[in-house]
Amino acid sequence: MSGHSHWATIRHKKQATDAKKGKIFSKISKLIIVAAREGGGDLSGNYKLQYAVSKAREMNMPKENVDKAIKKGTGELEGSQIESVIYEGFGPGGAAIMVETLTDNRNRTIPEIRRIFEMRGGNLGATNSVNWMFERKGFFTIAGNLPEDELLSAALEAGAADAELAGDVFEITCSPKDFEKVKTALIAKKLTPKTAEITFVPKNYVAVNQKDGQRLMELTEALEDHDDVQNVYANFDIPEPATGQTEK
C-alpha cells in the first residue's frame, strides 16, 4: 500500500500532536475499570488489563489513579456502572466506521453519536452493519527505514501474523493475546513501535478521494473528541495525489 495513508496510520500521527491529558486519563480509567471488572484485577491473567495499564503508563498516568480504577473494576471501591458499547455506521465515500465507547448512560450516548455522524455527512447504522469488515488484532507501526523483507522477517520472528508497508511506516499485526509478547520481542530487536495497541483492523480498505478523505477526518476527529468514545476505527485510505496535481 505504498503511496497510500491508511486511517489507522493517519490517526496515530494526529494523536501524537493533539493529546489532551485530562480527557485521556478519564478514558483510560474507564478502560481499566471495564477490563478489571471483566477479567479480575490480576494483570498476569488478564491481557485486557495488561493492555489498559500499559496505555496508562505510556501517558504517565499516576499510579494511584491506576490502582483506584482497578479497585473500582473489582468492586473494592464504589463507582458508576460503566459498559462497553460499539456503534457502527458509514461516512463520506462509503467508508465503514466503528466507534468503541465506554459509557455509564447509553441513552445519553447514542443520540450524541448519531448527531455527530449526521452533522458530518455520515449515518449511524444498525448493529452488525459493518463489524464483519473488521478483525480484532494487536497493531503496531514502525518507521519504514528498513528493507521490507528484513522487517517482515523480524516481525514474524517476534510472533507477528503479518507486516506491510503503508505510506512511510510498516504496519504489523498479531493476535490480541500475543500483543505483549510481540511488543516485547520487537523492542528487544531494537524495533521500537511508534504505535502499539489492540485494535480493530479492516479486512479491506476503501480508497476515497481527497475531498471525502477530509470530511472523514473531520467526522472521525469529532467522534474521538466525545468523552465516552475510546477509539474510532475506519476502513478508508487516501491515495496521495500525483506530483503537481490537486484534488478537484
Image (cartoon, rainbow, N blue to C red):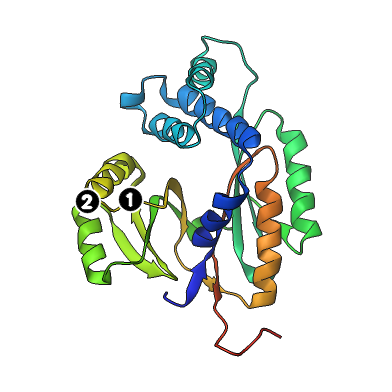
The quadrant of the rendering that contains the C terminus is bottom right
**Residue type (three-letter) at the residue carrying disc 1:** Thr
Q: Which residue is mark 1?
A: 192
The quadrant of the rendering that contains the N terminus is bottom left
Decide which of 202, 127 is in the foreground and name it.
202
- Badge 2 element: loop
Decide which of 238, 151 is in the foreground and name it.
151
Q: Residue at x 44, y 30 (%)?
A: 53
Q: Which residue is mark 2?
A: 189
Decide which of 112, 54 is in the foreground and name it.
54
| Residue, far bottom | 244
Q: Residue at x 71, y 67 (%)?
A: 215
Quote the CA–CA distance across marks 2 and 1: 8 Å
User: Residue 119, how many percent across, how many down?
Assistant: 81, 58
The relative height of residue 188 versus residue 134 in the rendered view (above or below) is above
Pointers 2 and 1 in contact (C-beta within 8 Å): no
User: Which corner quadrant of the image does residue 170 belong to?
Assistant: bottom left
User: Residue 213, how many percent across, how many down?
Assistant: 64, 70
Q: Residue at x 57, y 83 (%)?
A: 241
Residue 91 in sight in this render? no
Q: Seen in the image, is 51 located left or right of residue 17?
A: left
User: Residue 3, how many percent across, how many down?
Assistant: 46, 78
